[in-house]
């Protein structure tokens, strides 16, 4: 499955637009990670625990969007965007959405 943030794919022509596809997940922070984050906040630096948490959440949301597009018979997803929103003090939603399409290879004249 091709997933791109642009509205076009080089060498391919969009022949059918199938519609909106999306995937999301809501993740909560872990108390143990919060303690480490407080310590990192004092000395500075990246909070790797939160980076990993959000990275895993993005991958899960992306997998869900791709599964939805595959169920529609799509070859690709264009105009892909990510959004994050806070649900409550210690939980965030990761949403990814785009347009499922069918493609045709462009044959170049030589």
Image: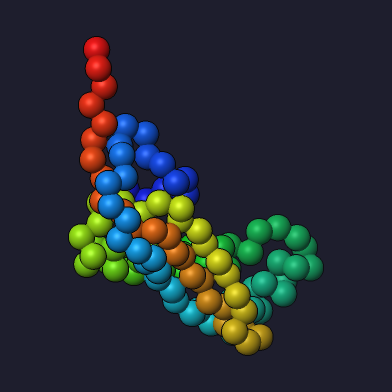
Where does the image place residue 103, in percent across and percent down from the top left?
Answer: 26, 45
Residue at 49% from the left image edge and 79% from the top image edge: 26
Q: Is residue 63 left or right of residue 70?
A: right
Give residue 98's quadrant in the image. bottom left
Residue in the foreground of this view, choosing between 93 and 44? 93
Residue placed furthest toward the bottom: 88
Residue at 27% from the left image edge and 46% from the top image edge: 15
Where does the image place residue 29, in percent across and percent down from the top left?
Answer: 56, 80
Q: Tell me how the rendering is colored.
A: rainbow
Residue at 50% from the left image edge and 79% from the top image edge: 27
Q: Is residue 108 above or below residue 6?
A: above
Image quadrant holding the C terminus, namely: top left
Where does the image place residue 94, in percent across and percent down from the top left?
Answer: 51, 71
**Residue 2 seen by the camera:** yes
Where does the image place residue 86, in percent across and percent down from the top left?
Answer: 62, 79
Q: Is residue 25 above or below residue 76?
A: below
Residue at 31% from the left image edge and 39% from the top image edge: 13
**Residue 52 seen by the camera:** no
Q: Is residue 55 above or below residue 91?
A: above
Q: Is residue 61 left or right of residue 45?
A: left
Residue in the foreground of this view, choosing between 99 and 55? 99
Q: Is residue 37 left or right of residue 51?
A: right
Give residue 34's quadrant in the image. bottom right
Residue in the foreground of this view, choosing between 99 and 84? 99
Residue in the foreground of this view, choosing between 61 and 12? 12
């Amino acid at each position: 499955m091709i997933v791109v943030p642009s509205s076009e794919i080089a060498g391919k022509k969009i022949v059918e637009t199938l519609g909106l596809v999306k995937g999301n997940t809501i993740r909560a922070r872990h108390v143990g990670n919060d303690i480490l984050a407080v310590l990192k906040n004092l000395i500075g630096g990246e909070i790797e625990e939160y980076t990993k948490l959000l990275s895993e959440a993005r991958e899960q949301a992306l997998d869900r969007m791709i599964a939805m597009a595959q169920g529609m018979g799509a070859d690709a997803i264009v105009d892909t965007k990510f959004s994050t929103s806070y649900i409550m003090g210690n939980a965030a939603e990761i949403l990814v959405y785009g347009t499922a399409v069918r493609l045709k290879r462009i044959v170049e004249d030589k």
